[in-house]
Amino acid sequence: MFTERLKNLTPYVPGEQPQDRRYIKLNTNENPYPPSPAVADYLKTVDVDNLRRYPDPLFTELRSALAQRYGVETDQVFVGNGSDEVLSFMFYAFFDSRQGPLLFPEYTYSFYPVYCDFYAIEFQKVALQGDFSVDLDGFLRAGPSCGLIFPNPNAPTGIGLPLARIEACMDSYPRDRVVAVDEAYIDFGGESALALINRYPNLIVARTFSKSMSLAGLRLGFALGDRQLIQALYTVKDSFNSYPVDTLAQQAGLRAVQDRAYYDRITARVIATRDAFSADLKRLGWFQMTSSANFVFTGKHGVSGEEIYLTLKEQGILVRYFNVDGLKNYVRVTIGTEEEMAALVAAMERYL
Ligand SMILES: *Cc1c(COP(=O)(O)O)cnc(C)c1O
């Protein structure tokens, strides 16, 4: 009844979305602020009759708004049902391990090995540097590979890479192998590789509406890159599901993209809260990595990440820990509102 393929899958485990009680939820890097009011305005006036029709399979309006927003051509933009879907299409389209393994950092977004399993792509993890930053030279030293993928800033460390380093890596990497930069958190302080996509036809950038755009529930992600790469993603999409992004998501997403002022404001607020929280951690004697994202990777000597997680959960606060060697002493804390972070700091002072 079940295929060998299915039996061999090891699915990604998303962060808890508890239904049992109300938590201060700092475990899945969601935005603490609501989406742009323009999204609510649109959803209140939806023409339901229009839902008889299939959505636009080319995402025309949303694509051109994104192109305008990021200063690229429309045919350099692909849209998908969350960036997880966009990433999975990239794995299918670009990474063929007959040319060598796909390389990604040892500690990174744990969906990458899941896609490798799904599409039968061999991979090799490349150790982080001593300061936990992604080792781009390590990618180059690793020998022949079919492509590279890494988040910038990296997850779950929050550490960003300077653009000059990515540029140097692109200069040394074969032009016929794709380099994918997953910029899920770039708006919170990273240096985007977008500035390089017109110079490197093998560079593709993945973005999401889930974090800085406060729309994780809408499921929207996109990719920016050379038109041939983008065309390849359309080919994968149209071989699988022509309509992954529904009409409501396309239209609501469009309103969000057009309200840049609102998002600049809430992003600045998250960044300010993060920096205040980092200062609190320092005052409390917790160690932490310098974050360019909307979360902080932190810990306390003598306490495991799991213990921190369990203690805070009892206090009604959810954070995320990773049961992996090398990350066991840390928890990843999403930046919430100022009030939520004050409650967390109080709980840390009292119980840890
Ligand atoms: C959250 C996240 C994503 C997935 O975003 P969705 O658009 O919600 O699918 C992709 N990559 C990284 C590194 C993330 O943290």
Image (cartoon, rainbow, N blue to C red):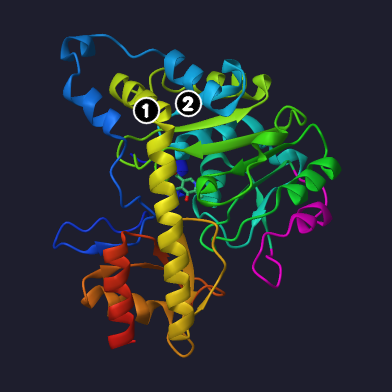
Which quadrant, please, contains the C terminus?
bottom left
Q: Which residue is mark 2?
A: 79
Residue in the picture at 71% in, 67% down:
129
Report the Cα–Cα distance between label 2 and label 1: 10 Å
In this view, which residue lies farthest toward the right? 172
Identify whether 22 is placed above or below 283. Answer: above
Q: Which residue is mark 1?
A: 253
Callout 1, which amino acid?
Answer: Gly
Q: Is residue 128 magenta?
A: yes
Find out whether the residues at labels 2 and 1 contact each other: C-beta distance under 8 Å.
yes
| Relative horizontal placement of residue 142, taking residue 224 as reference (left or right) | right
Foreground: disc 2 or disc 1: 1
Callout 2, which amino acid?
Answer: Val
| Element on which disc 1 rests | helix
Which segment is the magenta one?
Answer: 127-145
Q: Nearer the viewer, residue 313 or 37?
A: 37
Mark 2, residues whose alpha carbon is within 10 Å: few (<14), some, or many (≥20)? Answer: many
Instruction: Please tell me in which quadrant of the rendered image residue 233 appears.
Output: top right
Q: Nearer the viewer, residue 176 or 255?
A: 255
What predominant SS class does the magenta segment belong to? loop
Residue 98 in the image, given as x and y percentages of width and height: 73, 39
Mark 2, ligand 1, within 8 Å: the answer is: no
Residue in the picture at 33% in, 81% down:
348
Identify whether 210 is placed above or below 273. Answer: above
Residue 247 in the image, given as x and y percentages of width and height: 31, 19
Residue 295 in the image, given as x and y percentages of width and height: 45, 61
Residue 324 in the image, given as x and y percentages of width and height: 50, 71
